[in-house]
Structure formats: C-alpha cells, structure tokens
Amino acid sequence: MSGQERFFIFREGKILVRTDRREIAACSPGDWRELQPRAATVLPLDKGPEGSTFAVEMETGFEAGERFAWMSLRRLVGRVADEEFNAWGKAVQLLHWYRTHRFCGRCGQATIAHASDQAMICPSCSLSWYPQISPCVIVLVSRGEELLLARSPHFQEGMYSTLAGFVEPGESVEAAVHREIGEEVAVRVGGLRYFGSQPWPFPGQLMLGFLAEYAGGEIQIDGVEISDAAWYHYRRLPLIPGPATIAGRMIRHYQQILDGGGPGTDAQG
C-alpha cells in the first residue's frame, strides 16, 4: 500500500479520529492494517497525484483501541480546512448512498456497483442510481443596517441564522428563495445576488447562498420550522454561525460592507 493512501472511517454516522495526534486527519495505511478486518464497506473516493482515498463503514458495534475515538462529523466544522471537511463530507454521503441503494426500487433485485461509473445498477432491469445531492437555498435578507435572522427549534440555545430551505421539483433556485422566505417569515424580498455555495453533508445538501433586500411585509413566523425571527442591527447581533459555514460567511461579508471594507474576500464568483 502507498503511504499516500487515506481512509475516512465511520461507524453509525460518527468519524474515527486518532487521540494521540494534535490534528484531525483521516486514518493512515498503518491504521488501516489494524482496522481492516472489521470493515463492513470500503468505497473508493478519489485517486490523484497525492494518492488514493477511501470511505469506510465499520461493523456495527465495532470499538477501536485506546488510540482512537468517535466524533460527530459536525464537530469538524471550523476545526479543519474546507477541503478536508469536504473530503469527510463526500465520504459520509457516498456511504449513505451505498447503504440506501442496496436493492432495486423497481424490481427488488440486489444491486451491484457499476464497472466504471460511481453508480449502483440493477443486474435484472438495468436501472441505475447515482449519488444524489439535494439543492438548498440559504438567504441573508437585509434592510439597510439591519439583518433578518431567525432560529429553528433544533438550533443551540441563543443561535440565530439566515433563512434556508430545499428547492422543490420544477422550481428555480430564485423561485425557491421567494417561496421559502414567504413561508417561513412572510416577508417579500428583491435584489437577489448570488453569494456562493457550500456542500453540507447532513446528509447530502448543496447550499446555494444568496443576498437579498427586504421589499415589504411584516415578520410572521411559521411556528414550525422557525421559532423566532427578528431584525438585528449589524453591530448588535445575537449568537450566529461560525465563519466556516456559508451562513456565517454571508453575515460577516455584509458586516464588512457596512463597515466600509468593500465587498470582502468571502463572496464567490
């Protein structure tokens, strides 16, 4: 095995990390030799000049030795570089896709891996499944020096963020922005500007970020997805997501603009 091979190892949604290292990193070939006998699924991820990477699901109930610990994938947000987080995210998404497409949804036959594509195919009826991505819009609404922030019931205590939701079938991302904001807080927006995107592997979203300007209406929360929402002066914000998230980047980007710092470096495209 090449010393450049890396293994992103999971068990029931948790990632395996070494406790005797200062940095969080995928397991090395040396680690893999110890863990391989208890691996339930091994999927190839990438193969390039720096070596090959693999996604691994361990057997249910597997416990690693004292040098290892299990950690929530969400704890990596902001603790590792974006490129590294996206690699872990790709691994968990492919394992989820493989685990949920073991049988054909048309005829019930067990599926097999495609010989060359990243796909599962049915040997009986030839139906194929590729990894699925769910596009979501995430929107920062502004009104002069105020930002519209909201909290969901599942947020940590005191946390407020931007508005977000899934794009529905037959819907453009722009239409999704207007619909989601209308459904969640009952206000109208205009002046949409694309900000950037972020893969979000919980379990398989692609967040498409937009900046929008308030165009009318009074805040009325839906009481289901949103438990509270309000306008906040950009210098007096509640607890907000960290800068490793696209929501956190959009908020800080707008703060920088209002402080006279120009468009900043976080906006993409």
Image (cartoon, rainbow, N blue to C red):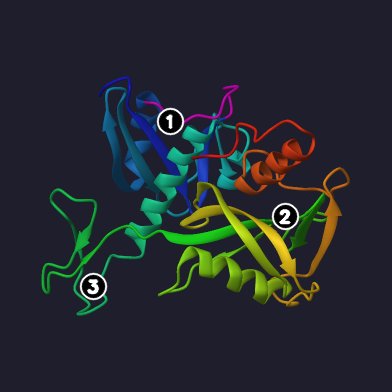
Q: Which circle marks residue 27 in the picture?
A: 1
Question: How far apart, in angstroms, are the residues tagged by discs 3 and 2?
Answer: 39 Å
**Residue type at the position of mark 1:** Cys
With respect to residue 141, does 245 lie above or below?
above
Question: Marks 3/1: CA distance?
Answer: 33 Å
Query: In the image, what residue occupies the spot 66% across and 45% down?
Result: 250
- Residue placed under numbered mark 2 in the picture: 161
For image coordinates 62% across by 44% down, the residue present is: 245
Secondary structure of residue under mark 2 = loop
Q: Earlier in the sequence, mark 3 or mark 1?
A: 1
Q: Is residue 93 magenta?
A: no
Specify the farthest residue to the bottom. 107
What span is in magenta?
Answer: 19-28
Q: Amino acid at mark 3?
A: Cys
Check the picture and name the quadrant holding the N terminus.
top left
* Image-based side of 174 in relation to 79, left or right: left
Q: Which residue is mark 3?
A: 104
Q: Quadrant of residue 170?
A: bottom left
The amino acid at mark 2 is: Ser
